Image (cartoon, helix red, strand yellow):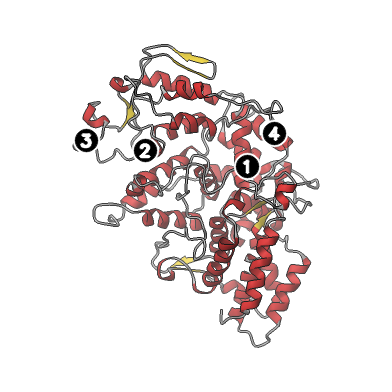
């Protein structure tokens, strides 16, 4: 970038960004608009794409505007899925006989940037932050193909029914490994079933901690808990006897001894009757009789959870938070929950209906007027926005990315590397001693936003915008269209504004960026482009998606 920004200016920018982020996200009032614009304007299309995809491109903005919202959703729902698992199988193993995480990251970024099924791409990423498994787990770190297959599973069920998604997640051996359901055994002597998956499937995947009204508000004050320790113990018995798939159900296969099936890291777990709980299983007001088979017990348990009244508002609110805003109104949550409960044809759990309810709700399609509205764009989304907006290409053709976990030199976030089952950030995280806390609002992404990660993001993007990113800077932007506008700074900034900020850039920010571009008449055309892109992406106005 030939140092177009002084170190002092950059430092002040870092400080201002961190302070501004503390007050620039949350929920808020909206003005009125139509909930389903049949043929959206370019600005309206860009805003929908900022929520429903990994980022707008000029081509997709025009396509959505021309074909209309309803047709765009139908088209996206019909797109075939491209499997990360297949991509990994097409490559030689990364280290010795093992496939490694970097090969998954390659496939992830290939599809995030170039996939034409952008709605599936974005929803799958959101689901991966609800139904969490992670390469940071020491076992999963050596099962790169298994984790890739799990991510594909989320994508496959993203447009199906939530009940099928829940069962597929439950039976996947990577989830079984991650939350100790694989190899879980029945009560015997002083040993009792492991309770980890039973707890998390209720707390994180279906019903949450508190009894909810249909609009997501607590049914009572103080709140009433949804389950007790006895419910966890009873449900844990359901998740016994499940272990590796294979041609037999021997003890050796259950414990993973001997010759392992080469496909066991992705085939659904099977139940071993010898290790399944034979005692009655009581939870959430339901009792499964003694000696009920593992398969039948699982059906009853998942049906019970699926039909719990909390699921619609609980999952609906989490999807809103991941795609649209951190603090949706109760009315918005209620409308999404209603779509979960009934898709209009008497079907419960239709994910297509839920996704459309989230993204086409008046609260989602209205540009908010409140300064506390919206959500923080998490770091992975910001990087994907840049790649898509400026048609990033890979010199190797593979999009060779490795981890970007480091908060000072990276992004403090890497896909499928959450630090715990609670994701990178919790849905109800409140940054302490902040204006967000004072307003009784949530800002989940602020959990990975602090002085170090703010500085790291700015350093990372300053280098990336100019030099590219990935291994050996394998991934670089194509600024051809922007270079053609470099001698018309206002037009250049307006293009960046449409692609990255959906024309929500304030007059003040626009003036500041233009002043920086014009401050040195000798600036090269490419430096003008670098400045326009970097100063936009460094601004709190961009980082807070509205």
Q: CA distance from mark 4 to mark 1?
A: 20 Å
Residue that numbered label 1 is attached to = 428
Q: CA distance from mark 4 to mark 3?
A: 50 Å
> Which is nearer the eye, 405 or 85?
405
Q: CA distance from mark 1 to mark 2?
A: 27 Å
Q: CA distance from mark 3 to mark 1?
A: 42 Å
Label 2 vs 3, first from the N-terminus: 2
| Marker disc for residue 416 | none
Q: Residues within 10 Å of mark 2 (few under 14, many from 20)?
A: some
> Which is nearer the eye, 254 or 477?
254
Q: Position of residue 465 (x, y in %)?
A: 55, 70
Label 3 vs 1, first from the N-terminus: 3
Label 4 vs 1, first from the N-terminus: 4
Image-quadrant location for residue 123: top right
Label 2 vs 4, first from the N-terminus: 2
Is residue 491 in sight in this rendering? yes
Residue that numbered label 3 is attached to = 257
> Which is nearer the eye, 199 or 502?
199
Residue, x 60% and y 76% (percent of image)?
483
Residue that numbered label 4 is attached to = 335
Residue that numbered label 2 is attached to = 177
| Contact flag, marks 1 and 2 (Cβ < 8 Å) | no
Is residue 488 in sight in this rendering? no
Secondary structure of residue under mark 4: helix
């Amino acid at each position: 970038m030939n140092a177009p920004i002084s170190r002092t200016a950059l430092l002040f920018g870092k400080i201002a960004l961190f302070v501004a982020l503390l007050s620039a996200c949350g929920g808020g009032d909206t003005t009125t608009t139509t909930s389903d614009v049949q043929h959206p304007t370019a600005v309206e299309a860009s805003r929908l794409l900022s929520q429903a995809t990994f980022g707008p491109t000029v081509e997709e903005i025009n396509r959505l505007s021309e074909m209309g919202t309803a047709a765009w959703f139908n088209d996206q729902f019909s797109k075939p899925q491209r499997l990360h698992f297949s991509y990994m199988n097409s490559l030689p193993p990364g280290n010795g006989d093992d496939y490694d995480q970097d090969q998954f990251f390659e496939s992830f970024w290939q599809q995030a940037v170039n996939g034409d099924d952008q709605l599936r791409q974005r929803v799958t990423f959101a689901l991966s932050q609800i139904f969490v498994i992670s390469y940071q787990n020491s076992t999963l770190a050596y099962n790169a193909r298994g984790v890739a297959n799990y991510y594909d599973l989320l994508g496959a069920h993203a447009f199906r029914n939530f009940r099928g998604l829940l069962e597929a997640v439950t039976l996947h051996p990577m989830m079984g490994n991650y939350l100790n359901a694989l190899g879980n055994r029945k009560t015997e002597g002083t040993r009792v079933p492991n309770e980890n998956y039973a707890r998390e499937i209720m707390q994180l995947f279906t019903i949450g901690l508190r009894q909810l009204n249909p609009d997501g508000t607590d049914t009572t004050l103080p709140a009433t808990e949804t389950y007790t320790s006895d419910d966890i113990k009873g449900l844990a018995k359901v998740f016994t006897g499940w272990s590796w798939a294979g041609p037999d159900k021997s003890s050796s296969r259950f414990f993973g001894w001997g010759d392992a099936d080469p496909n066991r890291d992705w085939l659904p777990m099977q139940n071993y009757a010898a290790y399944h709980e034979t005692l009655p299983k009581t939870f959430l007001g339901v009792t499964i009789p003694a000696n009920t088979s593992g398969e039948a017990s699982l059906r009853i348990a998942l049906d019970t959870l699926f039909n719990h009244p909390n699921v619609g508002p609980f999952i609906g609110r989490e999807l809103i938070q991941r795609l649209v805003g951190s603090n949706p109104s109760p009315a918005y949550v209620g409308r999404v929950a209603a779509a979960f409960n009934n898709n209009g044809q008497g079907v419960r759990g239709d994910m297509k209906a839920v996704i459309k309810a989230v993204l086409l709700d008046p609260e989602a399609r209205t540009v908010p007027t409140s300064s506390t509205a919206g959500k923080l764009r998490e770091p992975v989304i910001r990087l994907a926005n840049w790649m898509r907006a400026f048609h990033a290409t890979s010199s190797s053709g593979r999009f060779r990315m490795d981890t970007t976990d480091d908060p000072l030199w990276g992004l403090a976030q890497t896909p499928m590397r959450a630090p715990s089952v609670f994701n990178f950030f919790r849905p109800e995280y409140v940054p302490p001693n902040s204006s967000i806390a004072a307003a009784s609002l949530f800002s989940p992404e602020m959990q990975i936003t602090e002085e170090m990660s703010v500085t790291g993001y700015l350093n990372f993007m300053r280098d990336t915008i100019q030099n590219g990113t990935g291994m050996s800077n394998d991934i670089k932007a194509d600024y051809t269209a922007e270079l053609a506008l470099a001698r018309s700074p206002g037009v250049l900034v307006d293009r960046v504004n449409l692609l990255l900020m959906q024309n929500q850039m304030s007059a003040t920010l626009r003036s500041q960026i233009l002043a920086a571009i014009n401050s040195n008449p000798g600036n090269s055309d490419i430096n003008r482009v670098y400045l326009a892109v970097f100063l936009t992406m460094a601004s709190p106005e961009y980082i807070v998606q509205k």
